[in-house]
Amino acid sequence: MNTREKSLYHQIHPLKLATDWSTGLIALYLLWQHDLLPALVVAFVPSVIVSLVLMQWVNLGAYKQSSFGAYISRYMTRLMETIRVAGYVGMAIGAWYHMAWLIPLGLLVVLLAWFRGVLFPVKP
């Protein structure tokens, strides 16, 4: 498996998903409190460490062969990854400026990027 594939399939490993979602929520709380440096550390350091560990030492072949792996291979493009990040940035801005309505809106953008293939399937 090449680096590009590892970069793609590690995103659906349960440890990576749990890390990103949990640290993302904690970082939003810290941003709401205007604790910028701790928020940035919480948002990035655990995710980067988990990504490096998964891509270096975990066999991601089973994820590639799974139906979820086939789904993200088809629909999780760099553009969708960028849209996911943009959604989280919107959530972070909402937390920082106490604009609570931006947080669910950003979450909706993130979820739309994840579920693009379910909502708008492309015919083979």
Image: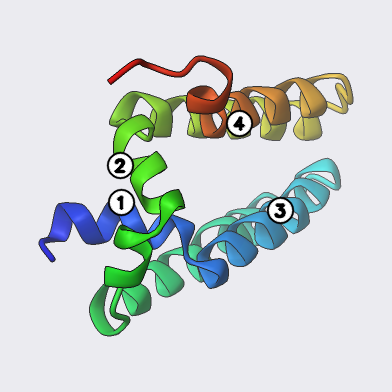
Q: Is residue 83 left or right of residue 25?
A: left
Q: Amino acid at mark 1?
A: Leu
- x and y, in percent, of residue 105 in the image: 75, 20
Q: Which residue is mark 1?
A: 8
- x and y, in percent, of residue 23 in the image: 67, 61
Q: Residues within 10 Å of mark 4 (few under 14, many from 20)?
A: many
Contact flag, marks 1 and 2 (Cβ < 8 Å):
yes
Residue pictured at 30% horizontal, 51% vertical:
8
Say if 64 sits above or below 103 in the image: below
Q: Which residue is mark 2?
A: 73
**SS state under label 2:** helix
Q: Nearer the viewer, residue 33 or 20?
A: 20
Residue 3 quadrant: bottom left
Q: Which residue is mark 3?
A: 27
Residue pictured at 40% horizontal, 40% vertical:
71
Residue 109 quadrant: top right
Label annotation for residue 74: none
Q: Amino acid at mark 4?
A: Val
Q: Earlier in the sequence, mark 1 or mark 3?
A: 1
Residue 72 quadrant: top left
Q: CA distance from mark 1 to mark 2?
A: 7 Å
- x and y, in percent, of residue 26 in the image: 76, 58
Q: Earlier in the sequence, mark 1 or mark 4?
A: 1
Residue pictured at 24% horizontal, 61% vertical:
6
Q: Amino acid at mark 3?
A: Ala
Q: Amino acid at mark 2?
A: Ser
Contact flag, marks 1 and 3 (Cβ < 8 Å):
no
Q: CA distance from mark 3 to mark 2?
A: 29 Å
